[in-house]
Amino acid sequence: EDKVVQSPLSLVVHEGDTVTLNCSYEVTNFRSLLWYKQEKKAPTFLFMLTSSGIEKKSGRLSSILDKKELFSILNITATQTGDSAIYLCAVDLYGNKLVFGAGTILRVKS
Amino acid sequence: DSGVTQTPKHLITATGQRVTLRCSPRSGDLSVYWYQQSLDQGLQFLIQYYNGEERAKGNILERFSAQQFPDLHSELNLSSLELGDSALYFCASSVSGGGEKLFFGSGTQLSVL
């Protein structure tokens, strides 16, 4: 069975801290790995990773994929209260199936 | 705003009833996906349509069905509702339906009492 596991389940940090969110997967027919941020309702897209070792960066957020060890990390530097959300990792499979992890709940305290 | 529209935003109904959730994809997107999100299960893939045809099926119960119409909007029908069907139902869309990011609607919160 295809499986995506995220850790930690939840995290509380102070503004300015750096956080690392983890996503490991065991799937067949891997195509890509995606990160989404969910605040209140709709998940919004952050990154899509297809190749190992190439860092994707957007402002204070960055992510990298290791296809040999089957994991990805999402880093957030200089966290702000607006970063508080659920961060979802998903693996896109050939055959058009997107499998989500349970998410990491991040709370940033001021 | 993702451009994906879901209605209604909230739905409260009783066990045994049937409901229909509606989704309009982003302009130009041909593929529609339905997901169920509950507290204990996370985001579960239900079904995907591409240009009117079913393309992939996930953990969709037999009591649930979906379709995509010629104008590309989609409906998810849930029947013989049970308490455990209470969840947030998301629709998402993408251009071609494979290997690309999805754009999610704001969801329909279904409460079965």
Image: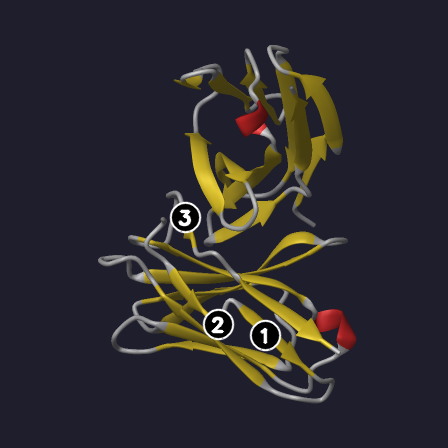
Considering every residue shown, the one lying at the far left of the view is B28
Tell me, yes or no, whether the two marked residues, 2 and 3, touch with CB atoms within 8 Å.
no
In space, the residues marked 1 and 3 are separated at their CA atoms by 24 Å
Nearer the observer: mark 1 or 3; the answer is 1
Residue B102's disc number: 3
Crowdedness near tag 1: few (<14), some (14–19) or many (≥20) residues, C-alpha within 10 Å = some
Residue found at x 25% / y 74%:
B71
Looking at the rendered structure, the secondary structure element under dot 1 is strand
> Mark 2 = which residue?
B8
Front-lying residue, A3 or B35? B35
The answer to whether residue B107 is above or below residue B10 is: above
Secondary structure at badge 3 equals loop
Q: Residue at x 63, y 85 (%)?
A: B79
C-beta proximity under 8 Å, tags 1 and 2: yes
**Residue, x 59% and y 74% (percent of image)?**
B11
**Quick one: label 2, few (<14), some, or many (20+) residues within 10 Å?**
some
Earlier sequence position, callout 2 versus callout 3: 2
Q: Are marks 1 and 3 in contact (CB under 8 Å)?
A: no
**Residue shown at 62%/15% (left/top)?**
A15
Numbered badge on residue B11: 1
Q: Amino acid at mark 3?
A: Leu
Residue A94 position, x and y percent, is: 46, 48
Q: Position of residue B96 (x, y in %)?
A: 30, 54
Gap in angstroms between the C-alphas marked 1 and 2: 7 Å
Q: Position of residue B34 (x, y in %)?
A: 50, 63
